[in-house]
C-alpha cells in the first residue's frame, strides 16, 4: 500500500501483462539526421514517418492499447551531437483500473552537444482506480536544448467519467552534464483528489511545458502575451529554464493551451500525429 494510505496495491494475480521496450538512436551523416540505432520488443514500437522537412519525428506507440497493473513499458530516444529531432507518441496513453499491482513506464532521453530535442508526447488519461508509476529522465550535454511537455487528464469529461480513486507517482528529471537542473516529482492519490482548493480544486486536467536551454528565460514575456481560453495558467523562468503550468476542467482546453505555448516556443507546427 502506498505510504499515503491511498489506493491499496496488492501483488498482481498471475495474468497476462504487457511488456515492451522501444529504443531509437539518431546520428548524423553529411549534415543529415540518420537512424543509428533501433530496438523494438513486445508492445513498444517506434517509427519515423515520412515528413516534409529536415527535422525527423520519432513516434512511439504502446500497441497494448493502454496500461494496467503489472504492465512494463519503456521508451528511449537519443539524439547525437548537432542533431535536431522531435519525439512524440501516436496517441494518448491510457492507464486503466488496476486489479492489483502498478503499471510502470520509463522514458529515457539523451541529447548530445549542440543537439535539440522536442519531447512532445500526447496526453495521459488516468481512469478510476488506475495505478501508474512513470519515470522520465533526460541527459543533456552542456550546449543541448530541450523542449518537453506532459499532459494528464482524469477520465474523459465527454463520457461523464469521474475519477475518485487513483495512485500516480510521476517523476521528471533533467540533468545537464550530470547535474540536476530540473526535478519534478508528482504524486496523486485518493486524498489529493478530495483535497479541494488545496490541490487540484475543480480541475480535471493539467499540464507542464518546459524549455531547458541557454537563455530560456527570454521566452517568458512572449508567452505571457498569449491568452489561452478556459484554463488557469502561469509562466516562470530562471537559470536557463522556462516553465508553463496549465490547469483546466478537462483535457480539451488544456491541450489547446499547450499547443499555443509549444507553437510559440518552437516557431513551427505540432507533430502531425497530434489531433486537435
Image (cartoon, rainbow, N blue to C red):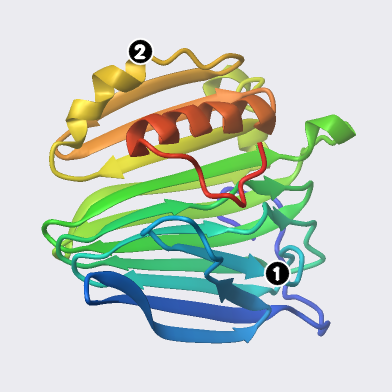
Residue 181 % position (x, y): 21, 50
Q: State if disc 2 and disc 1 touch (CB < 8 Å).
A: no
Name the foreground residue: 105 vs 262.
262
- Of the 4 image quadrants, the one containing the C terminus is top right
Q: Does dot 2 land on a helix, a strand or a loop? A: loop
Residue neighbourhood size for the residue with mark 2, other residues' Cα within 10 Å, grouped as few (<14), some (14–19), many (≥20): few
- Identify the residue shown where x is 83% and y is 82%: 15
Residue 21 % position (x, y): 55, 80
Residue 116 figure quarter? bottom left
Cα distance between the residues tagged 1 and 2: 44 Å
**28 left or right of 228?**
left
**149 left or right of 96?**
left
Above or below: residue 41 compared with residue 82: below
- Of the 4 image quadrants, the one containing the N terminus is bottom right
Name the foreground residue: 267 vs 106.
267
**46 left or right of 81?**
right
Which mark, residue 101? Answer: 1
Residue 200: in sight, yes or no? Answer: no
Q: Name the residue under label 2.
A: 225
Residue 142 % position (x, y): 11, 59
- Identify the residue shown where x is 78% and y is 62%: 98
Name the foreground residue: 245 vs 122.
122
- Identify the residue shown where x is 62% and y is 52%: 273
Residue 46 % position (x, y): 56, 73
Sequence-wise, the earlier of marks 1 and 2 is 1
Residue 82: in sight, yes or no? Answer: yes
Residue neighbourhood size for the residue with mark 1, other residues' Cα within 10 Å, grouped as few (<14), some (14–19), many (≥20): many
Amino acid at each position: 500500500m502506498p505510504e499515503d494510505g491511498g489506493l491499496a496495491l496488492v501483488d498482481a494475480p498471475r495474468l497476462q501483462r504487457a511488456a515492451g521496450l522501444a529504443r531509437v538512436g539518431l546520428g548524423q551523416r553529411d549534415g543529415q539526421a540518420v537512424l543509428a540505432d533501433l530496438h523494438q520488443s513486445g508492445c513498444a514500437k517506434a517509427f519515423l514517418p515520412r515528413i516534409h522537412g529536415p527535422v525527423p519525428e520519432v513516434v512511439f506507440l504502446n500497441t497494448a492499447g493502454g496500461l494496467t497493473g503489472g504492465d512494463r513499458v519503456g521508451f528511449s530516444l537519443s539524439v547525437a551531437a548537432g542533431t535536431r529531432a522531435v519525439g512524440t507518441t501516436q496517441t494518448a496513453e491510457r492507464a486503466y483500473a488496476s486489479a492489483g499491482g502498478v503499471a510502470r513506464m520509463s522514458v529515457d532521453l539523451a541529447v548530445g552537444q549542440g543537439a535539440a530535442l522536442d519531447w512532445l508526447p500526447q496526453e495521459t488519461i488516468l481512469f478510476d482506480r488506475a495505478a501508474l508509476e512513470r519515470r522520465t529522465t533526460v541527459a543533456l550535454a552542456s550546449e543541448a536544448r530541450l523542449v518537453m511537455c506532459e499532459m494528464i487528464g482524469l477520465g474523459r469529461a465527454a463520457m461523464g467519467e469521474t475519477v475518485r480513486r487513483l495512485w500516480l507517482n510521476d517523476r521528471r528529471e533533467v540533468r545537464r552534464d550530470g547535474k540536476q537542473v530540473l526535478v519534478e516529482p508528482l504524486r496523486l492519490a485518493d486524498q489529493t483528489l478530495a483535497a479541494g482548493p488545496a490541490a487540484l480544486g475543480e480541475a480535471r486536467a493539467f499540464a507542464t511545458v518546459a524549455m531547458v536551454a541557454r537563455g530560456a528565460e527570454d521566452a517568458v514575456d512572449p508567452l505571457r502575451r498569449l491568452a489561452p481560453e478556459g484554463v488557469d495558467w502561469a509562466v516562470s523562468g530562471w537559470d536557463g529554464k522556462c516553465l508553463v503550468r496549465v490547469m483546466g476542467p478537462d483535457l480539451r482546453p488544456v491541450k489547446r493551451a499547450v499547443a499555443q505555448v509549444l507553437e510559440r516556443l518552437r516557431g513551427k507546427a505540432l507533430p502531425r500525429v497530434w489531433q486537435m
